[in-house]
Image (cartoon, grey):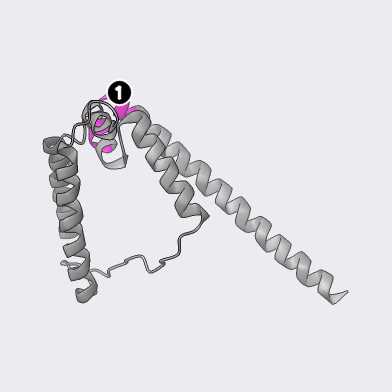
Amino acid sequence: MFILIVALLSGLIFGLGLILSGMTDPAKVLAFLDVAGSWDPSLALVMLGAISIGFLAFRAAKRRGQTLLSAPLHLPISRTIDRHLILGSLLFGAGWGLAGLCPGPSLVLAASGHSGGIIFVVAMLLGMVIFDRLEKCRQVDSKLNDRQQKNIGRE
């Protein structure tokens, strides 16, 4: 129960930080991304602060090997840049540039009843479901192809 309370408080603090920094305002985000027009560099400071804190936090977490609440720590171990990473990054950037939202701020907006946030979250969840289904189909096809290759080699 304590972990759930800490998770709730962490989410609330994160959401409050997004609101205070302006990250939940799509117009402000789009102005930040408009480097050729009326660029608003204020979110660069937000990002610099977040990256700095995240960098230090991840270094400390790696040394600890567990969370502050003694739960197992699951950090990514792959350093491979593959097709999925590149396509995912492109989709993330396109969505951010078109809507002025990314997952965190969109969840805050959706929770506050903002229609743009709700639409973004629904589209994001739908995209996740579609990806999951396509990935499962790809894995099944890959296993079938492997079996066929093995059967051909036995003949």
Corner quadrant of residue 73: bottom left
Provide the secondary structure element on which disc 1 rests. Answer: helix
Residue 150: x %, y % from top left: 77, 72
Residue furthest to the front = 36
Residue beneath the point at 49% across and 53% down: 84
Residue 30: x %, y % from top left: 27, 30
Q: Main secondary structure of the magenta part?
A: helix
Q: Which residue is mark 1?
A: 115
Residue furthest to the top = 115
Residue 125: x %, y % from top left: 41, 39
For this rendering, which residue is in front, 83 or 76? 83
Q: Is residue 82 left or right of residue 99?
A: right
Confirm whether residue 16 shows in the render.
Answer: yes
Corner quadrant of residue 74: bottom left
Q: Is residue 34 above or below residue 135?
A: above
Q: Is residue 98 above or below residue 71?
A: above
Q: Is residue 129 left or right of residue 40?
A: right
Residue 122, magenta (yes or no): no
**Please, what is the three-letter code of the amino acid marked with disc 1?**
Ser
Which stretch did the figure color magenta?
107-118
Quadrant for the N terminus, please.
bottom left
For this rendering, which residue is in front, 33 or 125? 33
Quadrant for the C terminus, please.
bottom right
Residue beneath the point at 12% across and 46% down: 13
Confirm whether residue 1 shows in the render.
Answer: no
Corner quadrant of residue 62: bottom left
Q: Is residue 6 left or right of residue 30?
A: left
Residue beneath the point at 24% across and 33% down: 29
